Amino acid sequence: EVPKYYLENSHPAIISKEVFEAVQELLKQKSRIHAPKKEMQQFPLSRMMKCGLCGSTFYRCPNEEYIGWMCYRHRQSKDLCKMDIVQEKEVYGAFLNLYNKLLEHKEEILTPMLCQLRELQGKILFSKPDVIRLNQEISELMKQNHSLSRLQSKGCIDSALFVERSTKNNQQLAQLQEELRRLREPDSISEMTEHTKTLLDLLEEAPPMLEFDPDIFKVMITNIVIHSNKFCFHLANGLILEEGR
């Protein structure tokens, strides 16, 4: 290693200091202009509403009088879609009505639906040959373990042999149960079943909703189709409920 030294103005500059500083200022200005804008603010109804006429998404368009939501194609041109602006408070009011009706009638709507879905889920599951085979093999191994325990308790087999056979059976059981678990991975019916149970749990002993709750709304609703005379609320469990306008 040898000593190093920094010398200022030891050789002619490629560009002058003034030009360099001017370029840096221009770069700063460009950065301010083209810097990434803040992430678009999300609202409870963002990307939730679809037009029943053309299928486009509704976008927020607030004005001095109210907060409205407008079909994208209607916003481009009224000739492309005739759907009128929807006031946000109207959608919130419709959801309040839907929630309170569902709360009052959950035992007539959601409870039977959950029972039917579970029955269908069981039929689908046990109609699969692999599931039937795995359940039979699991049942047979459990019977063998039960017999081994009984023989061991009566002294018919020694402890070493009991441990060896039980360990082997339990390893096979674990493998079969893992295969069965993979076959039971959530499908559409399973997801509908779970979402229906979630809705029932949510509504269990819940009070009537007096003001719009965005968190409950997000849990319950996947999207809303807007028609000129009604709102079609698509619930997380696949149920579609209508509210008039």
Image (cartoon, rainbow, N blue to C red):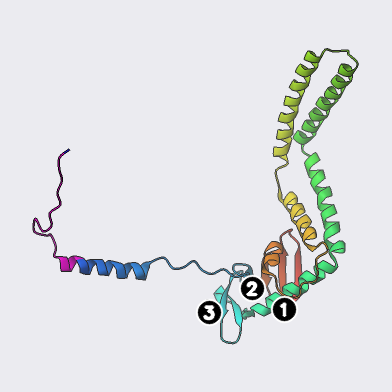
Query: With respect to residue 124, does 131 lie above or below?
Result: above
In terms of secondary structure, where does tag 3 sit? loop
Which of the numbered marks, if any, corresponds to residue 53?
2
Toward the bottom, the furthest residue is 65
Query: With respect to residue 237, does 230 lie above or below?
Result: below
Please indicate, yes or no, whether residue 80 appears anywhere in the rendered image: no
Mark earlier in primary sequence (2, 1): 2
Tell me the quadrant of the picture where the C terminus can be found.
bottom right
Q: Give the extent of the magenta segment.
A: 2-20
Residue 177 picture location, percent across and down: 74, 33
User: Residue at (8%, 56%) from the top-left corner?
Assistant: 11
**Quadrant location of residue 142?**
top right
Check disc 1 and report the residue beneath it: 229
Disc 1 to disc 3, C-alpha distance: 21 Å
User: Residue at (87%, 63%) from the top-left corner?
Assistant: 108
**Quadrant location of residue 131?**
top right
Residue 235 magenta: no
